[in-house]
Image (spheres, helix red, strand yellow):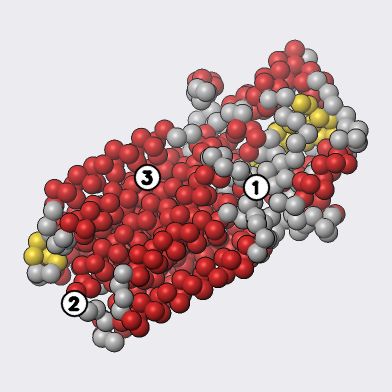
Amino acid sequence: MGNALLQYATVLMLTIFVGIEIIAKVPSILHTPLMSGSNAIHGVILVGAMLVLGSANTTLETVLGFLAVILATLNVVGGFVVTDRMLEMFKAKPKTPAAKNDEVAS
Amino acid sequence: MSRGTLIDLLYLISATTFILALKGLGSPKRARLGNGVAAVGMLIAIVATFFKQVDGHNLYHVWLILVAMAVGVVIAVPTARYVRMTAMPQLVAIFNGVGGGAASLVSITEFVHIHSTHPATYVTLEVLLGVLIGTVSFSGSAIAYAKLQELMTGRPVTYPGQQVINGILGAVGLVLIVIILVSGQTALLWVLLALSFVLGIAFVLPIGGADVPVLISLLNSFTGLAVAASGFTLGSNLLIVAGTLVGASGILLTRLMSKAMGRSLSNVLFSAFGSVITASGGAGADARPVRSGAPEDAGVLLSFASRVAIIPGYGLAVAQAQHVLRELAEELEAKGIEVFYAIHPVAGRMPGHMNVLLAEANVPYEQLKELDEANSELQTADVALVVGANDTVNPAAKDDRSSPIYGMPIINADLAENVLFLKRSMRPGFAGIENELLYNPKTTLIFGDAKDTLTKIVAAVKAS
């Protein structure tokens, strides 16, 4: 077991506490955006996907890495866009008669 | 400063933005800013990665990486932009699932890459855990998506010995990991991959549609852990920090969500909630009398009220009736009638979902009352207007110890002088439980499509 592993384990432990501490007091109306926002954050796996594709030596690695980059990009981009769209709804809008015309076409 | 150190510094900045973002997301004022900050941090990390050296060389296949990213962006942006807000829960499920799939693929690829160098046992363990958790999250999210999108039944799918079989599947997975670690038979990795895929499906099948949001939150947390495992394998602090943050906060969030439903997490995951009750509830229900009325009656009742509580549920959103509802509220206010919305924490398909849907329809934020406040205000309300809600106003949660939703906090619609219950049919709600409120003498049922009915009520209010 190397020093590096111990260092990663330290980071892991500390981050667990940060992760729990940070969302201890969240109003329930923000649970959904919070879930969606943290969904976008784990899209950071894109960095890992880039690294494995960027070091691929064989066809198998290249194919797997290529798929990983696609999936991870979906996660990052989709995650942030959806969260932003949700939170956009929370901003205070002026109550105007014009707002009546924005019925969702369905 | 060398290039490598600079990149690590940028990764540190990026990890910090993620922590700030989660903090921001916990407060209504800074939530949107927080999300933006995380997006910037993500962009920094991605750009920095293009300049990173791996195994002593610059990244290979840069064009392939760019092509794959372009494919991802082209699919993700329109999907995320234009899918209806009612379909948002399944959208989150699917974006979470692909993240889990990506984490699993990264672990597999790295393993294929390094396995000829006979990596240390702990490295193999990290890979195997990444594959197991990531794949469970992937296939589990896919089933969650199918349930919410109604591609399959939202009811729990159960079969005899289900939990035992799932337990065995899990145990076999762990044994397989031990065998691979001890024997070094890497071909078994593919067996583990297949097994994890089946496990994810089997785990999600018995969970009823109403509980799926809690499940998505849990799977979100799983994906975080899978990302952290990949971070160990790749030696990336950034992945470890981001993955663990999501993993830890996700588990806490999952518990908060099940608490909002008055249930424990294990009850949500293992009780096949909502599968049995319909059978017993259905038979006796048909014979019992209910009082039903026309939209015009409702309009008159509302016009002569002084305080009206609106209790919206998912059915409102399905009928796309939020805008008509707001119109009705505005008409009533124009007559000097006080209107407020009583929002159950799990109204809609996810905690907070209803707030988003109403905000989309420009309902003023100040009119939304949360559970406790709503219940105390309901005592002085003349009319409680239930639109598309069902389980969240079911008194069985208070009175009936045998009911599966017993203990869930509800909105006490029956405190109001009169209850107007807009309903499509006598069919039970999402959780499949009979609702006593329908038979309450205070209650008038108005059958029909919510949007249609509300439009008629608006006309009746205008006329009276």
The answer as to whether the residues below labels 1 and 3 share one chain is no
Along the viewing direction, whichever of A84 and B375 lies nearer the viewer: A84
Along the viewing direction, whichever of B134 and B2 lies nearer the viewer: B134
Question: In the rendered structure, the residue with mark 2 lies on which chain?
Answer: B
Q: Earlier in the sequence, mark 2 or mark 1?
A: 2
Task: Name the amino acid, label 2.
Answer: Thr
- SS at circle 1: loop
Q: Residues within 10 Å of mark 2 (few under 14, many from 20)?
A: few
Q: How far is the residue under mark 2 from the one under mark 3?
A: 37 Å
Task: Name the amino acid, label 3.
Answer: Gly
Residue designated by label 2: B117
Task: Name which residue lies at 84% across and 26% down.
Answer: B292
Task: Name the amino acid, label 1.
Answer: Arg
> What's the mark number on residue B155?
1
Can the viewer see residue B21 in this picture?
A: no
Task: Name which residue lies at 68% across and 43% down.
Answer: B430
Along the viewing direction, whichever of A53 and B2 lies nearer the viewer: A53
> What's the mark number on residue A103?
none
Question: In the rendered structure, the residue with mark 3 lies on which chain?
Answer: A
Along the viewing direction, whichever of B239 and B139 lies nearer the viewer: B139
Q: How far is the residue under mark 2 from the one under mark 1?
A: 48 Å
The answer as to whether the residues below labels 2 and 1 share one chain is yes
Residue B246 at x, y = what percent? Answer: 43, 62
Report the number of numbered marks. Answer: 3
Q: Measured along the vertical axis of the image, is residue A27 above or below residue B312?
A: below
Residue designated by label 3: A78
Residue B328 at x, y = what percent? Answer: 67, 24
